Amino acid sequence: MSLNSDHGDSLDYLQSFNERNAHLSFQRPLEDSDDEPLLDIGEGGPSCNHTGPCSCPPAGTTTTSRRPRFRDKKARNQLLICCVLSFLFMIGEFIGGYLAHSLAIMTDAAHMFSDFGSFLISLGALWIGSRQPTDKMTFGYYRAEVLGALVSVLIIWLLTGILVYEAVQRIIHKSIQIQGDTMLITAGCSVAFNILLTIILHFQGRSHGHSHGGTSRVTDGETEGRNINVRAAFIHVIGDLLQSVGVLIAAYIIRYKPEYQIADPICTFLFSGLVLVTTFTILRDTIRVLLEATPRSIDVSAVKRDLAILPGVRGVHNLHVWSLTMDKNVLNVHLILAQDADHEAVLHSATWRIRKNYPIHHCAIQVEKACPSSVLETKGVVEA
């Protein structure tokens, strides 16, 4: 068979393939849809008319990802409130630490800056996530969140390094007298403020979700319940609350035992280490995303096994899984089919299985028919 003939046959095949699959919804835009399901397989299960063995989902099971608009709006409001409050209190805490001559207070303010940065990045992620991909930015603007996190961590490390240097100088020279009353008041306000943020993010961040009639599974690289950005901010604030309690204890010691002024630089060292440890995980994750490493939540070997056992599949190759951002994963894979395999059934089953078992935001599956001469002929591409 000539090359031109093969090319013409492939084009005809693709056209007929698309016509036959007009009733199925495998296409999904890259950005999150607020109300649309990932894979529309009908109410009560897919309409499966396949005559051979099939791995289509059973009736009564749906694989959807619904993220109502009110949830993102609520998350934006929460993060905006926390962002404004964090900025105002961060400035106040820096001023209080300066007046009290307390490096521990300033270190706590630096940690508060990391909170402010995380809130700001989360707000930016929600805003950027609503922007549509363009011809020049086909994957959208999700990586802006990762770059923002990287810049935030580097700034925090710079501030922490300056404070550690000052703490060393104080231990050596012992030339500054800490104002215990001012430090105690500022530390107490810090604890109260972090408790307020915890209440805002925890109790208002709850969301109600359930399903009726059958089984519902949420995928799309996002978890159920509270918005992932709000949940991350909540964890960050818990760490800051513990640090503020430590500063408050040091303030009590200095206020009532002025001879133990060394408690302030010691707290600075301890909490600087805490800041570095907590932000190192963020730095590690951002580097993994920028290097397009396989997400930690996905086992590539398990994905291969799940796809290889599908009826009609003879091989799996060119499997790539990476992250656009912290919570949006992408998958590309080629499936080699047997000569008598029903490509419609395989594509449908593979798409459903990936959506069901793995947190995948966007996937592209390409099927290839294995020729007797071991030459692979591309038959079609389906994106989901």
Image (tube, rainbow, N blue to C red):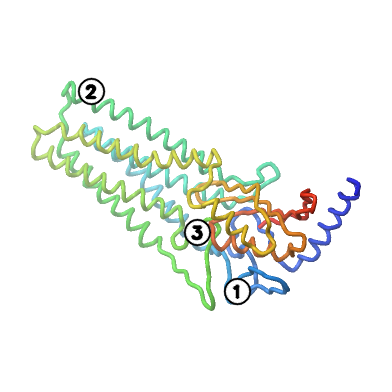
Residue furthest top in the image: 173
Is disc 2 surrounded by few (<14), some (14 to 19) or many (20+) residues within 10 Å?
few
Q: For the residues marked 1 and 2, what is the alpha-carbon distance in whole angstroms?
A: 69 Å
Give how far across and how far down residue 326 sits, in percent. Answer: 50, 48
Q: For the residues marked 1 and 3, what is the alpha-carbon distance in whole angstroms?
A: 35 Å
| Disc assigned to residue 169 | 2
Is disc 3 surrounded by few (<14), some (14 to 19) or many (20+) residues within 10 Å?
few
Q: For the residues marked 2 and 3, what is the alpha-carbon distance in whole angstroms?
A: 47 Å
Give how far across and how far down residue 59 sits, in percent. Answer: 61, 76
- In this rendering, the answer to whether 54 lies above or below 28 is below
Helix, strand or loop under label 2: helix
Q: Callout 1, which amino acid?
A: Pro
Give how far across and how far down residue 125 sits, in percent. Answer: 51, 48
Task: Residue at 61%, 61% (x, y): give it.
Answer: 309
Q: Quadrant of the C terminus?
A: bottom right
Helix, strand or loop under label 1: loop
Q: Do tag 2 and tag 3 residues touch (Cβ < 8 Å)?
A: no
